[in-house]
Image (cartoon, helix red, strand yellow):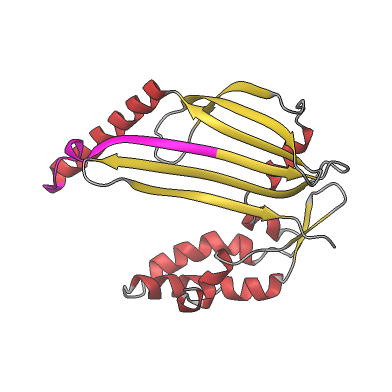
Amino acid sequence: MLEAMPAALRPYLMPMTVELDASGEMVRMRDWEAMRSQLRQLPEAAAAMSREPLDEAGIAALMSLLDSIINASAEDAPAGIIRGWPSVLGYGGAEFDLGETLEAETQVTGGLLSAPIPAVVQGSLTRTPAGTLRLFQTTLYDPAEMRAATLAIVESLRTQAANSGRTNPRDELQSISITDDVEIEFDPLTGLPLTARLARITTMVPTTESQVGGDITTIRRIEP
C-alpha cells in the first residue's frame, strides 16, 4: 500500500526519528533534508491523489502553511511536525502510587465537539514483568453531555440537509462516542518514556452501520 502513495505523502505514514537531550527534550530531526525535500512536493502530490485539476490558489494556500516547516532548521523542525512527544514527556512529572487508580475531573474539546464536554480522567501505574513502569490513562465522558452534543451535531446536519435536499440526518445519526486512551512505558531509573500510544477513537452510530475513525500516535524511544 505504501508503494502506491506519492513520495511526498510518505513522510506522514513512515516513522519519524528525533534526537533528544538528556532530559528528553526534542533537539533535532534526523534525516531532515530528505524529509524537507519530499514536503516541498506535497501540494502537487495531494492534488494528484484527489484527481482534480491543479488549483494554483489552493497550492499557494497549502504552501503558506508548509513554509514555516519547510524553512525550519533540523533543530526547529520537531516543534512543527512532531505530535505527542511533548505531552508524553510531561507525564514524567506525575505522581502515582503503584497499583492505585487516581481520578480527576476535566473538560475535553476538539474534533466534532462544538463545546467543552465534562469528563473524568482515570489513571493507574503498574510495574511490568520487565521491571519498567506502565501508566494507563482513560477519559470517561459524561453520557448526558455526549447525548446533548450528538443532538447539536444532528441539528446542524439537518439544517445542511434541508438546504441541500438530502435525507434528514436525524434518521441516520443516533449517537456519538469518543474514547481517549494514553498508555506509556517509563524507564524506572530515568523516568523518561520508552514507548507511548495515544489514541482518540470516535464512533458514530447511525441507523444503518456504525462508523469508526480516529487518530493514533505511537512513540518508541531508540537508544543512541
Front in this rendered view, residue 27 or 135: 135
Identify the residue shown where x is 66% and y is 63%. Answer: 16
Percent x, y of residue 32: 70, 70
Front in this rendered view, residue 88 or 185: 185
Q: Quadrant of residue 210?
A: top left
**Rendered position, 49 above or below 103:** below
Percent x, y of residue 26: 76, 53
Percent x, y of residue 153: 30, 35
Residue furthest front as drawn:
129
Percent x, y of residue 129: 77, 44
Q: Quadrant of residue 99?
A: top right
Quarter of the figure that contains the C terminus: bottom right
Query: Image check: 24 left or right of 51?
Result: right
> Which contiguous range is marked in magenta?
164-180
Identify the residue shown where x is 71% and y is 63%. Answer: 17
Q: Quadrant of residue 133?
A: top right
In reply to whether residue 220 is colored magenta, the answer given is no
**Rendered position, 43 above or below 152:** below
**Rendered position, 55 above or below 142:** below
In reply to whether residue 177 is colored magenta, the answer given is yes
Identify the residue shown where x is 53% and y is 77%. Answer: 7
Query: Image check: 131 left or right of 4?
Result: right
Query: Image check: 91 left or right of 208?
Result: right
Identify the residue shown where x is 24% and y is 40%. Answer: 157
